[in-house]
Image (cartoon, helix red, strand yellow):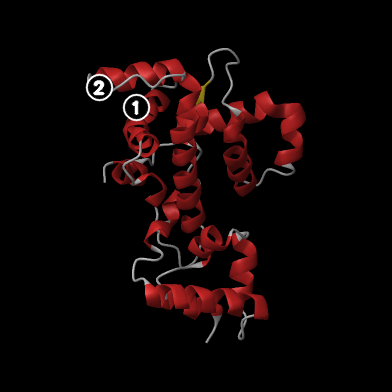
Amino acid sequence: MTGQERLAELGLNAVKASYYLELPVEIIASACAEEEPPVWLDICLTAMEDEAEEDDDAFTYLQVGADFQGTSWSEVTARQAVPIIIEYAQRGEIMTYADLDRELRARDPERKNAGTLPKYARPLGLIGAVIDQIRSEARLKDGAVSREYDQIPPLEVIVTRGKTGMPGTGADGFLVSYLTAMGEKNVEDRLHFERKALYEKAQKSVMAYDKWGLLLSLSKK
């Protein structure tokens, strides 16, 4: 049985396994395609199978959108922030952490003070992780997401820090992931010299994008 078939029996694929094993999806997909899994993959899959046998819900958290489906402040805030940020994107506007805080409060008068505005970096990171997963799934042959989402951009990059006018450094990984998927070369290295230009490119992509339906539906769960 191939690694791909064994993952399928667990209800997983290479993208979900990459989150669990913390390995690049390309490495896992390549190994899973072999007729006989490499030793390292066989060991990993056996451990995963044992875990699934002990707990039927062992891998539930790996489902698309699971990163912000919990009840913590960050997860709830991430879900509530999605439609707000999309509205700004559709109007072609950049927003700040302060804008996001104000909009969230306006829609929920009972919302408690967030404290320091940089606290919003965590929910924005959760949004970025979900978008990354959507894009990765959409680019897989056996992915759980329609191919139409294979170019979904990192929505969170239009939310900037007031003092710098740029997203926080926590968004860098999502920027690199997106631009690399879009064919840009050496993005991580170029960030040191072209940070503003690269972010502006991604921000323009966000504002031009119009297929936010899946992300919106996940944010309402």
Which residue in the structure is indicated by mark 1?
84
Image coordinates of residue 96 in percent, x first then y, are 47, 18
- Give the vertical position of 17 relative to 32 (above or below): above
- Front-most of 88 and 17? 17
Residue sitting at the far top:
163
For marks 2 and 1, give the CA distance: 10 Å
At 44% from the left edge and 75% from the top edge, which residue is drawn?
Answer: 8
Residue sitting at the far front:
54
Image coordinates of residue 76 in percent, x first then y, are 33, 36
- Give the vertical position of 74 relative to 110 (above or below): below
In this orientation, does residue 51 appear? yes
- Front-most of 185 and 158? 158
For residue 107, the mark is 2
Disc 1, SS: helix
Image coordinates of residue 209 in percent, x first then y, are 44, 36
Neighbour tally class for label 2: few under 14, some 14-19, many 20 plus, Cα within 10 Å: few
- Front-most of 188 and 20? 20
The number of callouts visible is 2
Image coordinates of residue 100 in percent, x first then y, are 39, 21
Neighbour tally class for label 1: few under 14, some 14-19, many 20 plus, Cα within 10 Å: some
The image quarter in which residue 29 lies: bottom right
In this orientation, does residue 94 appear? no
Looking at the rendered structure, the kind of residue marked 1 is Ile
Closer to viewer: mark 2 or mark 1: 2
- Give the vertical position of 218 relative to 7 (above or below): above
Q: Earlier in the sequence, mark 2 or mark 1?
A: 1
| Disc 2 and disc 1 in contact, CB within 8 angstroms | yes
